[in-house]
Amino acid sequence: MRGVLQRFARSREFHTPWPNRPRLEVLTYLDDKEHKKVFPSDRSRRLPSAHVVRSSPLPRFRAPICDPIFHWRALRFHRSCHGLGLERVSSEVNQELFNPWSASKFLSIAFAAQSLRESGLGLHTTVKGLALGDLVSLVCCYDKSRAYGRVEINSNSVANYFHSLIGPDSPTTLLQKRLGLSSKHCFETTYQTSWRQDPALPLPRGLKTARGRKGGYKKMSLEALTEGLRFCLSELHPDDLEILLYGASESQWYPETFAGARTEMGGLSSDPSIYFQSALNISEVERNSRGRWRIFSKSGFGPATSDRDNEFVIAGYLYLPVFEENDESVSDHSREFIVAARLDGRGLPDSQADEIFAKNLKRLVESL
């Protein structure tokens, strides 16, 4: 019966994140083929911290040597007694607009959160007893074992739901005005969800400004993704930011294992890709941070077609503190930064492009 939440019984085969164009090959880094993803030992829902105050400037940035099909942009954080400073670095001389695929979903959630706030609500809201925070986690971790009524819900359809909550301004207007981007940027999408695939989740009670489902297309730059994450960290209500990063505080669904994947933390912590993790010596990071490190990310993939090549996209915020045994922070060794990157596959097999994307991201993260 519509309106009743239920679980689908499914085999434990690995999920396919893009149902409209099934990708038969499970990729090493994008899909965590070997199930290597790990989570911090400290599971507290801490927000980006201001306690790591640097007493010296950031080391001079030296741009890595990367493959020409790899493009990136980063924001380096410098917290001091004078406040938060940002250093913007990029491989691009001229901005190129592209389809960010699923990497833009965190912006749909963030803009929806602000629309909810304008109606006196937030991401803590429930719909028919279902926490929006669990839907946030579903978008990020690609759980395909859920349904609303008789209609399966997946990352794309739920991202489309959040996108429909945005209003009264259009997503494109918000993208341009709140992030200070050019008028060439566009953010109208249904995330490839047809009317038949739409589970018709009800609007949160009291929401007054939703524009509803609108078609269109997405064209963004790497700047849109980095500034979008910066916007989330600095402008979202703290309660909404916590849910975006970690999911619902009292989850009905997570953490658990589903369809062969583990999500021990929700929200942007649960992105199945391991690009950033693989760029680090994660055991050393765990030890130096005393389990307080964080990787929040959203990946996207565009399959090759007759008129375009395959594309890999990711946006992430990394918080890598260093603590001494007495729990005092070693601020000058800590790092905090935002990264957005994409790779144009140019006819390469998905598995090879996945490896190249991971290799270049490692070079970039090491330089940061």
Image (spheres, rainbow, N blue to C red):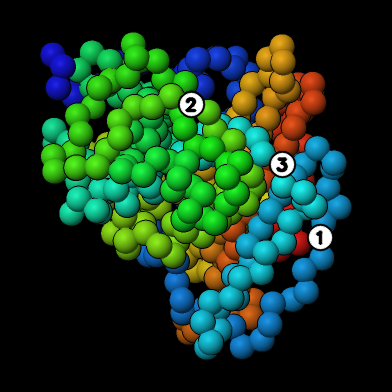
Look at mark 3 in the image and give the residue it sits on: 96
Q: Which image quarter is the N terminus in?
A: top left
Q: Residues within 10 Å of mark 1 (few under 14, many from 20)?
A: few
Which circle marks residue 8 in the picture?
none
Check residue 63 in the rendering and tell me which mark sits there, or answer none: 1
Q: Which one is in front in this view, the residue at disc 1 or the one at disc 3?
A: 3
Q: Nearer the viewer, residue 108 or 57?
A: 108
Dot 1 lies on which element?
loop
Residue shown at the point (79%, 21%) measured from the top left:
347
Where is mark 2, residue-wise? 216
Residue type at the position of mark 1: Ala
Crowd class of label 3 (few under 14; some 14 to 19; many from 20; radius 10 Å): few
Give residue 142's quadrant in the image. Answer: top left
The secondary element bearing badge 2 is classed as loop
Q: Mark 2 or mark 1, which has the lower sequence index?
A: 1
292 shown above or below 180: below
Q: CA distance from mark 2 to mark 3?
A: 19 Å
- Residue 341 screen position, x and y as percent: 67, 45
Q: Residue at x 77, y 49 (%)?
A: 94
Residue 30 image offset from top left, x and y in percent: 61, 34
The CA span between labels 2 and 1 is 36 Å
Tell how many labels: 3
